[in-house]
Image: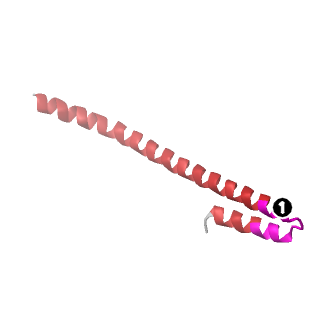
């Protein structure tokens, strides 16, 4: 189960135990904001992993491409 689903359930259970109507809305809104920020952090971490992988691939491919270019010039 994704982390953000667990946080949403926890917030809704807490809302049921609360006595003020206004606090229900505040807690749900905070929960949704936290959920969106968690998703954004996960996406950013995933993008960083992709960038790191492409950087490593570039380091591996650079000598191969230089060698292929020098062979084609000769």
Farthest residue in the left direction? 74
| Magenta span includes 46 | no
| Residue 32 in the image, given as x and y percentages of width and height | 68, 58
Image quarter for residue 15?
bottom right
In the rendered view, tell whether residue 32 sits above or below residue 9. above
Position above or below: 17 against 33:
below
Q: Majority secondary structure of the magenta segment?
A: helix
Residue 60 appears at what percent x and percent y?
A: 33, 40
Q: On the rendered image, what quadrant is the C terminus found in? A: top left
Residue 14 at x, y percent in the picture: 81, 67
The N terminus sits in image quarter: bottom right
Q: Secondary structure at mark 1?
A: helix
Residue 46's place in the image compared with 73, above or below, is: below
Quadrant in the picture for residue 10: bottom right
Q: Which residues are magenta?
A: 12-25
- The verdict on residue 21 being magenta is yes
Q: Residue at x 41, y 39 (%)?
A: 55
Mark 1 surroundings: few (<14), some (14-19) or many (≥20) residues within 10 A: few
Residue 23 spot, x, y in % from top left = 83, 61
Residue that appears at 85% across and 65% down:
21
**Farthest right residue in view:** 19
Q: Which residue is mark 1?
A: 22
Residue at 17%, 29% in the rendered image: 70
């Amino acid at each position: 189960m994704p982390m953000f689903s667990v946080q949403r359930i926890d917030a809704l259970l807490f809302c049921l135990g609360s006595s003020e109507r206004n606090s229900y809305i505040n807690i749900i809104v905070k929960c949704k904001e936290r959920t969106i920020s968690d998703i954004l952090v996960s996406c950013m971490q995933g993008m960083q992993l992709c960038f790191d992988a492409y950087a490593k691939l570039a380091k591996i491919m650079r000598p191969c491409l230089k060698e292929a270019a020098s062979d084609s010039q000769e």
